[in-house]
Image (spheres, rainbow, N blue to C red):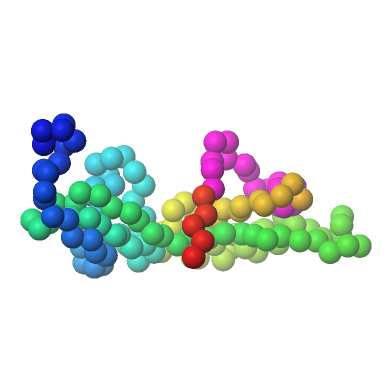
Amino acid sequence: MDASGNGHKEGTALIYRTLALEEWSRAAAQLKAHGLYVPHPKMATAHVAETLDGEIAGLGIMQMILHAEPWLVNEGWHGRVDLPRIERMMAVRARVLTSATSQTIMPGYVLDAIDERQAKLAEIAGFVERPGWRVFVKEF
């Protein structure tokens, strides 16, 4: 710990880089140590700040996640389109994509309902809202 009590060595140089797939276990160990979810390495990349000695000082994980949006029912077809049937078709594909060898952040997929209509269609299709979840977007 340095004199300021920050828990790091003042003046220690950090290298910023993306870990190679062969180094994934280093990121996984950090995530596990903090009780965080460890995505499958073939579906994510680990970006680290590390010391010259290889100690990971911080990291960020970028991972693929399946989304199931947008949804729509055209005018004149309300009450006739079977949204749960469409969702079941999507679920078959999602199970293939999220198998044990290609796991994403969660089994299944998420839906970001941008308005009340999308939320209603999601509920009809059997999606369940996760209380407390917040979605953040980084545009570039």
The number of numbered badges drawn on the structure is: 0
Image coords of residue 60 (percent x, y): 33, 54
Q: Nearer the viewer, residue 88 or 15?
A: 15
Q: Nearer the viewer, residue 4 or 84?
A: 4
Image coords of residue 112 (percent x, y): 61, 52
Residue drawn at x 57%, y 36% is 131
Q: Which residues are magenta?
A: 118-135
Residue drawn at x 56%, y 66% is 93
- Classified by dominant secondary structure, the portion drawn in magenta counts as loop
Q: Does 54 appear in magenta?
A: no
- Residue 28: tell me if it is visible: no
- Residue 72: tell me if it is visible: yes
Quadrant containing the N terminus is top left
Residue drawn at x 31%, y 40% is 35
91 lies left or right of 27: right
Q: Quadrant of residue 47?
A: bottom left
Query: Residue at the right extreme?
Result: 76
Query: Residue at the left extreme?
Result: 53
75 shown above or below 128:
below
Q: Nearer the viewer, residue 13 or 136?
A: 13
Q: Does 120 appear in magenta?
A: yes
Image coords of residue 130 (percent x, y): 57, 40
Q: Nearer the viewer, residue 64 or 1?
A: 1
Image coords of residue 86 (percent x, y): 70, 62
130 lies left or right of 115: left
20 lies left or right of 41: left
88 lies left or right of 65: right
10 shown above or below 63:
above
Q: Quadrant of residue 50?
A: bottom left
